[in-house]
Image (cartoon, helix red, strand yellow):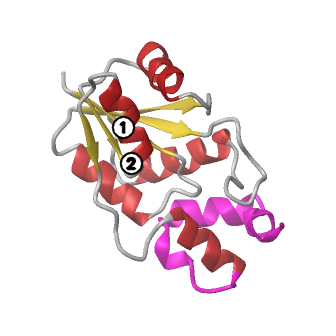
Amino acid sequence: MNRALFIGRFQPFHNAHLADVRDILKKADEIVIGIGSSQEKNTPQNPFSYDERKNMISKTLKNNKIKNFKIYPVPDLYDDYKWADYIIRKLPKFDVAYSGNEWAIRCFKKHKIKAVKIKLVKGLSSTKVRDAIIKNKNWKKLVPEEVYSHILKINGIKRVRSP
């Protein structure tokens, strides 16, 4: 079985992330999703907890008929080597790692792990989604319906807008 790792903070999970999952699953039988900065929540850059992000991603993937995934927390360890080593030891074995983050790609390559940088969608990032929420712009079209509904349900808009 060919297994891929997709690692990101997913603050929040948006439409490009969903497209990335679909693309990765064209090359892999299963995807392991590592939610980075898993210990972070209620901050400007990390407004959502690990459990909230896991819930958003799970609902979205299941409603899009994607079943071959598992989600794991990946805490910040503030050390390149320890961070990659934690992933290798704690998450299921994987054949290739995918991320949009150059630092994460470098960490994997230092461990001799095949790593692929995903192509970022111009104009779409979790930062842009949070910025649209702060500025009261139309952010609904940037995220899957499940994510939009979940953020409303947990009063996430207020949290994103809080300093």
Q: CA distance from mark 1 to mark 2?
A: 6 Å
Total marks shown come to: 2
Is 153 on the left-hand or right-hand side of 85? right
Q: Visible in this render: residue 155?
A: yes
Residue under circle 1? Answer: 106
Q: Visible in this render: residue 6?
A: no
Q: Is residue 61 above or below residue 2?
A: below
Image quadrant where one finds the C terminus: bottom right
Amino acid found under the numbered disc labelled 2: Glu
Asked which secondary structure carries label 1, the reply is: helix
Name which residue lies at 66% across and 39% down: 51
The range drawn in magenta is: 135-163
Residue under circle 2? Answer: 102
Image quadrant where one finds the N terminus: top left
- Prevailing secondary structure of the magenta residues: helix
Is residue 138 magenta-colored? yes
Q: Say which quarter of the image contains residue 105.
A: top left
Q: Is residue 69 above or below residue 25?
A: above
Asked which secondary structure carries label 2, the reply is: helix
Q: Residue furthest top?
A: 89
x and y, in percent, of residue 44 in the image: 73, 60
Classify mark 1: residues with Cα within 10 Å, few (<14), some (14-19) or many (20+): some
Classify mark 2: residues with Cα within 10 Å, few (<14), some (14-19) or many (20+): few
x and y, in percent, of residue 29 in the image: 21, 32
Amino acid found under the numbered disc labelled 1: Arg
Is residue 50 magenta-colored? no
Name which residue lies at 63% across and 69% down: 130
- Pointer 1 and pointer 2: residues touching (CB < 8 Å)? yes
x and y, in percent, of residue 68 in the image: 32, 34
Q: Nearer the viewer, residue 4 or 141?
A: 4
Q: Which mark, by number, is residue 18? A: none
Q: Nearer the viewer, residue 79 or 89?
A: 79
